[in-house]
Image: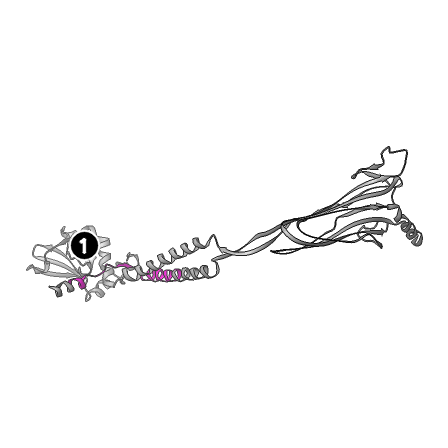
Amino acid sequence: MKKKAKKAATSKKVKRYSINKSLRNVLVILSVVAFLFCTYMIFITQKYQKYTEVKHSVYSYSNKSYVNYEVILLPNNIYTQKSIEEGSIYITKLIDYINTSFKYEFSGEKIAQINGKYNVIAVLEGFLPGDSIDKAIWRKEYTLQPDIEFKEEDKRVYIEGKTPINIKSYFAFIEAASQTAEINFLTKLSIKWNVSMEAKTDKGIIKEKLSPTMEIPLGSKYFQVGGILSEEKPGNIEETMNIISPFYNKKLVFYSVASGISFIALLFILLFTAKKAMLTTLDKIRKQIFKEHGSRLAGICSDVTSLSKVLIEVLSIDDLVKIADDIGRPILYKNNINEGEINNFYIIDEEKIYMLNIGEKSTKSIIKENNVNNVDVSSINI
């Protein structure tokens, strides 16, 4: 009994679906390529794309400096006040001096060792009339305030200083330069407050430089103060850290699922599909007969040739159809589970049996009699 059971089990075959050979090969190649690609992308994602660099601030600070000024007037019968606020237009002959106030502030979120210095210099430049103000032909520099150092260990440093600007003191050099060159130069006086600082924190070192500048055009009867009188540079010390990429898990799941699907598809194609067998000439003739004359064919269970009648063999299906039309009889064939074994077609007429045999031995003569075109192989759906 066990042997019989084993034989029964081994005799059961897995059902395989027949598909076109070329299509099957293409599907196998695509599945293999997809599986290998997804496997490779899983490796790349895990090794190179798992982490991403993110910068975050570990120490933030603000660094700013600004200059305010007030123009002090000489006694005159035009103005009743002794000074004019900033942002106005000033008459050169009425000015005694310009009083400037410089302020600098550094503020950090934690205590740091802060070292720095600042100075004030004046730069007097001469330009040719009508020429660009960026092309000074002479330049004279004055130190208004030598370096002043500051040092603190705190979160904040605040410095304030006052520097008077006596613009009349520069007219002597301007007049001397004009007389020497015999040219009435256009002149510009620039006052610069140069600040440099360094702060040592537990997260790193901060180095910053600021240079607010006041610009005063001289040589004209009136002027307006220009330049950049305030500067502010907020900043922070950043650290780079690796974190898991927000796309890592999504990519890993996607490529894993795609890899699994492609592998299952490959197994299914290899195990449950088979290359569709190529139709022989005989199969094509048989299919052509059923396609063109199927409505006139009748399947029977008996073997017609076993009847004791005269057997007349015809050469083509067209001959058999013509006889069937003439005598008004149907075309018969013995029905068979395997369509590939249906080779004979009959017409029974009283004592005669007309038979068409499309078996291997008769195939060549059938094709010849039908002039090949009657069996249109290319039009058959395989």
Would you say residue 275 is visible in this rendering? no
Q: In this view of the protein, which residue sits in the foreground, 329 or 21? A: 21
> Is 263 one of the magenta-colored residues?
no
How far across and down, in percent of the image, does residue 187 sit? Answer: 85, 49
Q: In this view of the protein, which residue sits in the foreground, 122 or 152? A: 152
- Residue occupying the far left of the picture: 308
By secondary structure, the bulk of the magenta-drawn segment is best described as helix
- Residue occupying the far front of the picture: 153
Q: Is residue 312 left or right of residue 213?
A: left
Q: Which residue is mark 1?
A: 322
How far across and down, in percent of the image, does residue 289 sit? Answer: 22, 56
Q: Is residue 207 left or right of residue 360?
A: right
Quadrant of the image occupied by residue 240:
bottom right
How far across and down, in percent of the image, does residue 347 sit? Answer: 13, 55
Q: How many marks?
A: 1
Q: Residues within 10 Å of mark 1 (few under 14, many from 20)?
A: few
Would you say residue 117 is visible in this rendering? yes
Question: Does residue 382 lie above or below 66 as drawn?
Answer: below
Tell me the colour scheme of the image: one colour
Q: Secondary structure at mark 1?
A: helix
Q: Looking at numbered disc 1 in the image, what kind of residue is underneath it?
A: Lys
The magenta-colored residue range is 8-34
Q: Is residue 190 left or right of residue 329?
A: right
Q: What's the residue at 87%, 43% (across, down)?
A: 220
How far across and down, in percent of the image, does residue 338 sit? Answer: 18, 59
Question: Does residue 100 lie above or below 38 as drawn?
Answer: above
> Is 33 one of the magenta-colored residues?
yes
Q: In this view of the protein, which residue sits in the foreground, 35 or 26? A: 35
Quadrant of the image occupied by residue 382:
bottom left
